[in-house]
Amino acid sequence: MRQALFGSWNLRDSGIALAAFFLAERERWALWAPVFVGTGIAIYFALPWEPAVWAGPVLLVGALFACLVRSRSVLATLLAFGVALSALGFTVAHLRAQFVAAPVLERPYGPAPVSGRVRHVELFPKGPRVLLDQVTLGRLSPERTPELVRIRLHADDRPAVGSRISVYAKLMPPGEPSAPGTYDFQRHAWFAKIGAVGFAFGQGKRIAGEPSNEGGSIALWIAAVRQQVTTRIRAAAPGEAGAIAAALVTGDRSGISRDTMAAMRDSGLAHLLAISGLHMGLVAAILFFGLRTLLACSERLALRYPIKKGAAAVALLGGFAYLVLAGATIPTQRAFLMTGFVLVAVLLDRIAISLRLVAWAATVILLISPESLLSASFQMSFAAVVALVALYEDGWRAWKKTGVESWLGKLSLYMGGVATTTIVAGAATGIFAMYHFGRIAHFGVAANLLAVPITAFWIMPWAVIAMILMPFGLEALAFVPMTWGIDAVVGVAGVVAGWPGAVGHTPAMPVEGLAVAAFGGLWLCLWRRKWRYAGLVGIVAGVASISLYAVPDILVSGDGRLMAVLDQDGALLLSTKRRERRTASAWLRRAGQHDANAWRSSAAVIRCDGLACSYETKGRMVALVNDARALLEDCRRANIVISAIPVRSRCPSARLVVDRFDLWRKGAHAIWFDREGLKVATVAGTQGERLWTRKRPPWKRKRINSGAVVQSVFLAP
């Protein structure tokens, strides 16, 4: 029977074939190093509890010991190295979370006076947002005072970086996720050492004295320079184009209007606003080829000195300056590392572009900033560059050597390259865009065919010229023509975004589906032989996992001010469209909706009075209570009671009661109805007991130094 079903196939032959494939790809093994490091980091962040300090180092030492043990099996040795790299990632992430420990505001503070030194300024249309350090809160002791506080100021305030201000403000602890599984700002704030966020009442007051750099070292000086450059750019090129010019030079996108940002996203051009490989590569290329051409004009220099290497060195320094000026974000770090490796390869007469370059850049970033693995910028930037470099290795060089001589042929080749690059990068980043943002730009190829050449050949060259002229006060000579190109790109974005069906909205992708799709993509790109195409199965399976997501039947925000229910057509209905707009946007994005109706406009689905709302769905009566006077009646007839106020009495008919105390303890709730009963998920349940969750007073979280860790692990009796 077995022979009839499987013929000559057997498990042993398949294992030998896979081993042969694996051994034939030995030159690609090193490319998986950052994947194993990232796996260890992902395991740390996925845990529902905080592991013991010694867990990671002990696992790392054990794995390294296993690597030193001689084994006849190459696969066993490589597996030990993989476990060691994963243990390294786990340990680095754990230690990083301990090292950044800082006090977090436990409960709302104010309105009350808040004073501190301005460390960073973002200029939004509705008012600047500042990051304060050296904070003083009159009602809190120094050990309970957050290290960094972020405050939205009055629209007329324009504080300078390094100045000290005092403002009457309302502060809150960093916000929890808006629903189970959504973006965790608490975790982001923990690693950024932001212990409180809030807004000011009225204008702030400057505290006497000159801007101070005390305790801020070079970081504060860089922030001040970035602010000055941004201000000068907006002065030289006022309006929307100037705000975009500032975004391209200093990375400050705060001045760009919502409409323009929406148009850029919907047209697939948002990547042009985030300083990444395109911008860093263009800056380095302009400096490299410009200086090399200039030096080649001198016969003496060209014949006696290695002008190519000199130009590469200058381009490397220029790229580093651009990295610092742009704020050293994750995409910029990745872009600089890769561009730097390319220029160093030029200096050493080596081949520049390869996936080894990408692997080294990813490993360095993950070891320095392990939390970046969870960010959309890291995932999307590396997904795009891995796919493009894999394409380059597979045949891009051969395509470029087609021998086309005519300008029309070269133009066609360039436009084809832009189209191919857009398609490949869009496919690679599209999966992560669906997971993080729930949207796809359908006409991104058309928009990029027009916008990328304008950016490459007009906007960025003028940006480099402007920065060269800025020390002489002549930057307006370059920023004005630069804005002409920016206006053209914004015009393209507006036209493409206005096309019918320009944007597709998708439901949330499960994190397991994202992991499967990412692994499939890596399998496809990192290997060279035919077995690589098995990765397509993982990509398809990951994308198909979207169909497994079920929109919750009921959603309740952590403060009870916003609720949502699912109607008969599978669309969310909101209790209000005027409050908690950011939370509502996150809910709709995960449901794959662009907009939603309010309960009041859907009387056929849900009935409301001044005290509560109720509706019947899937054989269950649900009561949504806002006033204590409605509890007596609703607790007698409803199967499910969701109350924004405390429920102090029994609800005999209710199978599930969620009241204000439950929301306060567990955060936002998501409830699903199924044939077997109810499924309830909470923010507290998905976050777990971690350092960045408010399960115990933040000022009792001890900062652990490396010496203490070493002593506790290796020197304990």
Image (cartoon, rainbow, N blue to C red):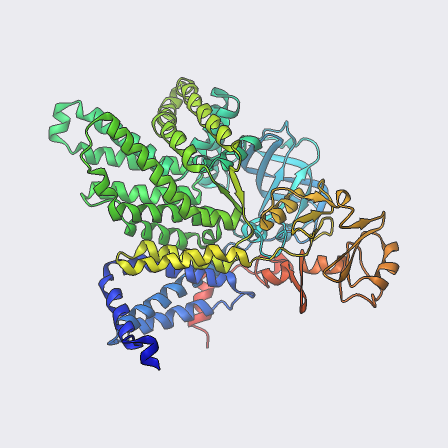
- Judge from the rendering whether residue 40 lies leftward or rightward of residue 508; answer left or right: left
Q: Is residue 454 visible?
A: yes
* Horizontal and vertical percent position of residue 139: 71, 47
Q: Residue at x 74, y 47 (%)?
A: 575
Question: Foreground: 355 or 388?
Answer: 388
Q: Residue furthest bottom?
A: 1
Locate residue 111: give its quadrant: top right
Q: Residue at x 65, y 59 (%)?
A: 697
Drawn side of residue 339 relative to residue 304, left or right: right
Question: Residue 610 in the image: x percent, y percent?
Answer: 85, 47
Which quarter of the rendering shows the N terminus?
Answer: bottom left
**Location of residue 59 (image quadrant):** bottom left
Q: Position of residue 329 (x, y in %)?
A: 44, 42
In the picture provided, is 298 more to the left or to the right than 69?
A: left
Residue name at image x 59 percent, y 36 percent: 129
The answer to whether residue 231 shows anywhere in this view is no
Establish if 463 lies above or below 114.
Answer: above
Measuring 41% from the left and 19% from the top, which residue is drawn there?
481
Residue nearer the viewer, 431 or 110: 431
Q: Position of residue 366 (x, y in %)?
A: 40, 54
- In the image shown, does 200 or 456 lie closer to the viewer? 456
Question: Would you say 249 lies left or right of 692 here?
Answer: left
